[in-house]
């Protein structure tokens, strides 16, 4: 029996969903649906009654090294077993990610069918999705590359398109040859595609046998195959993580699956690939307007989350994270409030949010990179106040978690426990602090903070000194293998 190995590509940035999506916390980790992140939803759409089908293996995830603990923690929270998390030292697009994962999957001697899925998409009808995968399985097992084309519902200009060829003889009416891949079209061209009925949105979802992919990537992109082979051969296991060799992977050409293989193979070996039509409520959630389109709406067509008051307003998307947002007489707006940034834009200009991110990058603004709340493998910290030579943070440490043994060259710290119990290492001392107790860490003093309890540890940290940057951390020991 050919087993299916879900391969989740979680390396995207999602800049068009700023300010919720940031470089250090991109959209695949966001809950655009209540209580489920896009990454968790990607895994759960494959499951029935909390378990994978008999022919499915536990998934592989490929992500940036910086996001490794977010992936692990979200999998833990959702109760899903991840087979392995493959860490890219730098982003090199989807073709190298798939190539490295295919090699890793075959190291055990198996040759599974890889169900390749971006981690940041929505699928409203999981049963419809799994039915399409079932149709695709026999073709992938026969050595073909199967891509899934979404039946379009609008003349969307933000997606690439697949032009359908003829129906495969004896196959399901949803299985076609591929005539061509089309770039993102103009509005007029997109309208002609929709009217023709012979085009599908390119969802970037594939089903392909691992050995088949390695053969075709070696044929069309031998430099990618060679670099990825060196990166996997030089990789090291770190618990649930597989760390690709940095030098080899950095040298790998950056190419998408479509450009590297799909377009050339359709041109000269059309019999090697097919498209299965997918009608399952798919969205890539690529902009605030697309999120508005797929979200449940009020009677006034508003999509609201958080502490929001709307009066005489309709067709808006309004999110509030930290305070009351009130809208009066508003129509067709996107209003997104976070503790450190507010976005206001017409829905039809939602794609232009990327220009704001580009501006933030040019200005070297931190709002492009991180939220005020920053996640770490041991928990999180959140900026409360900052001024000349001081900074205040709220720190939450998960049960049984520990910060690194560390010291600072430029700052001292005062810790006050608000909730839970802290185990503190300070120089040669090790002691416990309870609620409303505090301690002081002097400049240059070696220290560690741990949570020995069964509930989250919450504390306030007051930093003081000439320099308060996060790079003033000298780690002496770290259970998470951070440098």
Image: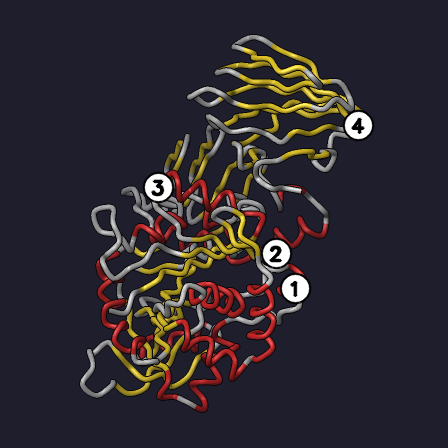
Q: Is residue 85 above or below residue 111?
A: above
Give the side of residue 411 with respect to residue 298, left or right.
right
Which residue is denoted by mark 2 in the rendering? Answer: 89
Which residue is denoted by mark 1 in the rendering? Answer: 250
Q: Which of pointers 4 and 2 lies earlier in the amino acid sequence?
A: 2
Q: Which of pointers 2 and 1 lies earlier in the amino acid sequence?
A: 2
At a point 42% along the width and 42% down the height, the residue shown is 74
Q: Which of pointers 1 and 3 lies earlier in the amino acid sequence?
A: 3
Assign a secondary structure to mark 2: loop
Please provide percent x and percent y for residue 343: 54, 43
Where is residue 432, by image quadrant? Answer: top right
* For the residues bearing labels 2 and 1, Cβ distance under 8 angstroms: yes
Please provide percent x and percent y for residue 334: 47, 46
Which residue is denoted by mark 3 in the rendering? Answer: 78
Q: CA–CA distance between discs 3 and 4?
A: 40 Å
Q: Is residue 29 above or below residue 185?
A: above
Is residue 227 or residue 365 the one in the foreground? Answer: 227
Which residue is denoted by mark 4 in the rendering? Answer: 410
* For the residues bearing labels 4 and 2, Cβ distance under 8 angstroms: no
Where is residue 341, by image quadrant? Answer: top right
Q: Which of pointers 4 and 1 lies earlier in the amino acid sequence?
A: 1
Tell me the crowding category of disc 3: few under 14, some 14 to 19, or many 20 or more residues within 10 angstroms, Cα based: some
Is residue 209 or residue 347 the one in the foreground? Answer: 209
Assign a secondary structure to mark 1: helix
Q: Residue furthest right?
A: 466
């Amino acid at each position: 029996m050919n087993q299916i190995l879900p391969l989740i590509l979680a390396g995207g940035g999602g800049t068009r969903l700023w300010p919720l999506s940031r470089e250090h916390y991109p959209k695949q980790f966001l809950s655009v649906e209540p209580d489920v992140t896009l990454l968790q939803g990607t895994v759960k759409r494959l499951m029935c009654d909390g378990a994978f089908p008999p022919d499915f293996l536990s998934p592989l995830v490929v992500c940036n090294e910086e996001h490794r603990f977010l992936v692990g923690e979200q999998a833990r929270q959702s109760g899903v077993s991840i087979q392995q998390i493959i860490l890219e030292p730098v982003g090199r697009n989807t073709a190298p990610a798939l190539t490295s994962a295919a090699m890793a999957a075959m190291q055990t001697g198996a040759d599974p069918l890889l169900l390749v899925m971006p981690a940041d998409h929505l699928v409203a009808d999981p049963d419809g999705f799994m039915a399409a995968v079932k149709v695709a399985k026999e073709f992938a097992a026969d050595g073909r590359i199967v891509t899934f084309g979404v039946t379009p519902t609008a003349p969307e200009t933000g997606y690439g398109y697949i032009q359908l060829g003829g129906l495969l003889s004896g196959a399901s009416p949803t299985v076609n040859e591929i005539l061509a891949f089309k770039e993102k079209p103009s509005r007029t061209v997109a309208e002609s595609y929709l009217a023709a009925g012979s085009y599908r949105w390119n969802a970037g979802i594939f089903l392909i046998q691992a050995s088949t992919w390695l053969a075709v990537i070696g044929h069309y992109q031998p430099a990618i195959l060679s670099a990825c082979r060196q990166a996997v051969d030089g990789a090291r296991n770190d618990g649930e993580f597989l760390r690709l060799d940095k030098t080899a992977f950095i040298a790998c050409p950056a190419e998408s699956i479509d450009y590297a293989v799909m377009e050339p193979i359709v041109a000269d070996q059309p019999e090697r690939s097919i498209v299965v039509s997918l009608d399952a409520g798919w969205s890539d959630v690529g902009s605030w307007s697309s999120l508005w389109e797929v979200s449940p709406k009020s009677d006034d067509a508003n999509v609201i989350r958080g502490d929001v008051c709307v009066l005489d307003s309709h067709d808006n998307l309004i999110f509030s994270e930290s305070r009351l947002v009130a809208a009066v007489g508003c129509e067709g707006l996107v209003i997104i409030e976070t503790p450190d940034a507010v976005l206001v834009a017409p829905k039809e200009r939602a794609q232009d949010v990327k220009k704001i991110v580009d501006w933030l990058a040019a200005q070297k603004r931190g709002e492009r990179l991180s939220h005020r709340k920053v996640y770490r493998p041991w928990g999180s910290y959140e900026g409360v106040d900052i001024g000349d030579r001081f900074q205040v943070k709220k720190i939450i440490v998960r049960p049984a978690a520990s910060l690194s043994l560390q010291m600072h060259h430029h700052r001292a710290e005062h810790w006050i426990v608000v909730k839970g119990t802290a185990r503190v290492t300070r120089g040669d001392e090790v002691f416990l602090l309870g609620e409303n107790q505090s301690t002081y860490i002097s400049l240059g003093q070696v220290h560690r903070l741990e949570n020995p309890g069964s509930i989250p540890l919450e504390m306030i940290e007051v930093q003081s000194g000439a320099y308060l940057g996060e790079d003033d951390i000298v780690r002496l020991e770290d259970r998470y293998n951070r440098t």
